[in-house]
Amino acid sequence: MECPLYEKIAKQIEQQVHEGIFLPGAKIPSVRKSSKQMEVSVATVLQAYSLLEDRGVIKARPQKGYFVQENQLQALPLAKITPTKNDGSIHALLRRLLHASQDENIIQFGAAIPKSQFLPIRQLQRSVGRLMRLEPEICAAYEFTPGSPSLRRQIAIRMLDSGCQLQPDDITITLGCQNALMLSLQVVAKAGDTIAIESPAYHGVLQAIEVLNLKAVEIPCSPSTGIDLALLESAAIEWNIKACIVTPNNQNPVGATLNQQARQQLIDQSITHNFTLIEDDVYGELSYADRRERALKADDKQGTVIYCSSFSKSIAPGFRIGWVVGGRFQTQIEHYAYVQSLAIPTLTQTAIANFLENGAYDRHLRKTRLAYQDNLARCQALIEEHFPAGTQTSSPKGGFLLWVILPDSINAMTLHTQALEKDIGVLPGLAFSLTAQFSHHFRLNYALNWDNKTDAALKELGRLCQQQIQPQTPQQIQA
Ligand SMILES: Cc1ncc(COP(=O)(O)O)c(C=O)c1O
């Protein structure tokens, strides 16, 4: 028997909530509006809304309308160490969240994008200008995969700092690190396979897994020690994982850096349990220590590591230049890269190669890392002073991302919604997992031009958190 119309409508709205079209705490269309939109009677919509209320999906507020229950996303299954298949809801959620990150008027604590003062824009401007003046034919030339030989040579030279001895031919240029990760997943796994990921994980990894129809096992990743290797080992035994995507340096979002022993253990596990390590080193050059950490790839004797990185966090995210060192998968990666995009922009590859060649990069990195350390100290002090008691923060040793763990009772999605109304962007923890376990966490980008406005915005975030614990009286709201 076909289900009644009001039930179909309820199902449709529930799906929209699940996909993040209506976020927790958001108002859904009024009964009258829905009745018009869907061309059904007001009575039918009322019946659908009352069914959704019974199911705990929405809540009526007298005189105000219907709102999505705050704990909606927390109702998703808590599957910390069970393969989970993304149902697309992460994508819908992120599209909304990242859209806000494009808005110039918003203080961008949300996106992991450095403000342009931390990028060598002026040098790049000169370099691109000179190229266009002296070599305009560059626009007519394809730089076929694997990419510019001079850029690959410069990358091979830079990677000596990470302990890797490479030939330019070991390297394929990609469209950013995201493209490198995607290509790596494509060559190591097929639809339905299981991949171990850090939890919380960079959201681009969750989306890649979704698009490729893979399953993810989320392995807890602590801000101080990184991925839990004992749990990774059990997952490898239990789930026949094909690969593990790991960020050994300055992990996004928790900022963890693995110690040398953990790195070796990780490589040993990949050999013993026959899985590939996909190393995401996009923040590797931003370590605050004098010397950057060694890459996993540097100690990869059996070819179980694929190394991925880019210049997006340190030179120019808009140039979209990344690379992959595929080891025994290199030929296949190169072929896939060629089929997918034929070539990578000639102009941006050449501009970056020239910038690396002239030696200014290390100076630029030194300056930037010092500025990030100052901003981090400022951020941590403000959080300590203005956020509710019990708030914890990570202690990154590099990069520009801070992971903030609020007291359990605070909903970071509500914080995100309320902050956005005040032109402050933050990325809530729900964006970093296929489960709802990070509901009182958020990530904060501190690669910002730090001034009084930024101070005030961070204090405001603290106030919004305090407010969730101690709701304001009507008099306070009016004031
Ligand atoms: C951990 C991590 N990997 C990969 C990427 C993607 O980098 P790209 O912009 O070079 O594609 C990001 C971007 O935020 C990231 O944080």
Image (spheres, helix red, strand yellow):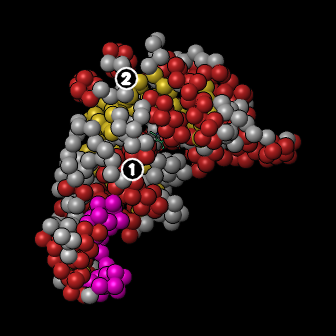
- Residue range corresponding to the magenta coloring: 13-40
Identify the residue under disc 1. 444
Residue 18 forms part of the magenta stretch: yes
Residue 246 forms part of the magenta stretch: no
Name the residue: 33% across, 47% down.
Answer: 86
Identify the residue under disc 2. 275
Dividing the image into 4 quarters, which one contains the C terminus? bottom left
Asked whether 386 or 447 is in front, the reply is: 447
x and y, in percent, of residue 463 in the image: 28, 63
Name the residue: 38% across, 28% down.
Answer: 243
Report helix, strand or loop for mark 2. loop
Q: Residue furthest front?
A: 1
Judged by depth in the image, the label closer to the viewer, 2 or 1, is 2
Q: Is residue 226 above or below residue 390?
A: above
Mark 1: amino acid = Leu
> Is residue 360 in view?
no
Q: Residue furthest right?
A: 134
Report helix, strand or loop for mark 1. strand
Q: Is residue 455 above or below residue 68?
A: above
Asked whether 385 or 272 is in front, the reply is: 272
Whichever of labels 2 and 1 marks the residue nearer the N terminus, that label is 2
Quadrant of residue 376 in the image? top left
Quadrant of residue 258 in the image? top left
C-alpha separation, residue under disc 2 versus residue under disc 1: 33 Å
Name the residue: 22% across, 53% down.
Answer: 76
x and y, in percent, of residue 342 in the image: 67, 39
x and y, in percent, of residue 337 in the image: 60, 35
Name the residue: 34% across, 85% down.
Answer: 39
Q: Residue furthest left?
A: 54
